Image: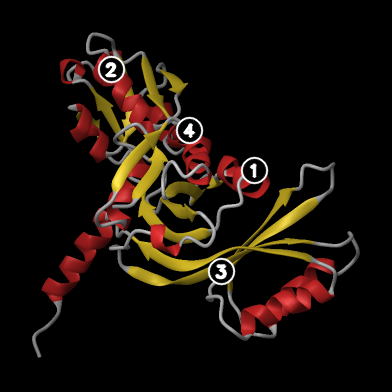
Amino acid sequence: MATVGYLGPQGTFTELAVDALFSEVEKQPFTTIHESMDAVASEEVDVALVPLENAIEGSVNMTLDHLIHKRDLPIAGEIIVPIEQHLLVHPDQAERLAELETVYSHPHAIAQCHDFFREELPEATLASVDSTGAAAAKVAENPDEPIGAVANELAAKQYGLVQVKTQIHDYEKNHTRFVVLARKNHPETLPAYQAPKTGVKTTLMISLPTDYSGALHQVLSAFSWRRLNLSKIESRPMKTGLGNYFFIIDVNHGMDEVLMPGVVAELEALNCSVRILGSYSCHALPSRTETEDEKHAEKTVPES
């Protein structure tokens, strides 16, 4: 059975994503994203599932930078998971919502609920911890303290907490993209995927030879005239000085034998540095709202 590393402890959105994507795996939680990635490189686990991008907060830079600068681990899959944030408290504190002094969560989760805290709990202190699961664990371990956590429904169940406020995130269409990181040339370590497949994607890292007028246009043209759709393009600092950047490009196309090799050859002919970060299948977990909408649509379809 394959072992999957993820940002722990129990009850994080990453664990929720692991459960959604894989059918039968052994889960190994880690304190930080970096530790779960390092565990793949050291062969402590077979793969790691890590957050890469959020619809509200954007890219998870600590993941991206560690992948680019520290660990050469190919992306072997992705899953997009709806992020539904809830305010959790210990059952002993369920009737004392107005008295909450501190609410704990991951910095991204806190940022995603800014409007709620401004309007509902303006006096509460917002404290950052390593994960939403760690926030839930802290609340469970301190039943006598007037504290709460921003976390998901899985955390509420695992830690025996009460959801005193549900769906407290500012934006309804909040999703996080998680990617599977594996070791090179070890396809046998990849566990089977069970989540619905939505497509395929190739991610490339591209560095321009020099900063000259039209350089990025030339790069994008290599995809454009081949009619390859780009779902994302992002610049990141190379960490070699101000003004030095590389580009991360997601292409909605697999690594075939013609089009993608042609892109790479054309870019290298322009003296660009090209690194393929992965070519992989994409999966998605529908949100509760999307599932309810589908069920409603099925019930309202007129009989023929």
Labels 3 & 2 near each other (Cβ < 8 A)? no
Determine whether, in the image, residue 265 is placed left or right of residue 172: right
Q: Which residue is drawn at 53% across and 40% down?
A: 38
Q: Is residue 299 above or below residue 152?
A: below
Label 4 vs 3, first from the N-terminus? 4
Local secondary structure at mark 3: strand
Local secondary structure at mark 4: loop
Q: Which circle, 4 or 2, is nearer the viewer? A: 4
Q: Which circle, 3 or 2, is nearer the viewer? A: 3
Q: What amino acid type should be assigned to the residue bearing mark 3?
A: Thr
Q: In which quarter of the image is residue 63?
A: top right
Label 3 vs 2, first from the N-terminus? 2
Q: Which circle, 1 or 3, is nearer the viewer? A: 1
Q: Which circle, 1 or 4, is nearer the viewer? A: 1
On the image, the x and y values in percent for residue 259 come to: 63, 83
The residues tagged by marks 4 and 3 sit, at their Cα atoms, a distance apart of: 26 Å
Label 1 vs 4, first from the N-terminus? 4
Determine whether, in the image, residue 136 is placed left or right of residue 304: right
On the image, the x and y values in percent for residue 89 come to: 24, 23
Q: Name the residue under label 3.
A: 202
Q: Name the residue under label 1.
A: 70
User: Which numbered tag is attached to residue 98?
Assistant: 2
Q: Which residue is drawn at 28% across and 63% down?
A: 194
Label 1 vs 3, first from the N-terminus? 1
Q: Quadrant of residue 242?
A: top right
Q: What amino acid type should be assigned to the residue bearing mark 1?
A: Lys
Can residue 120 be seen at all in this image of the molecule? no
Q: Quadrant of residue 260?
A: bottom right
Local secondary structure at mark 1: loop
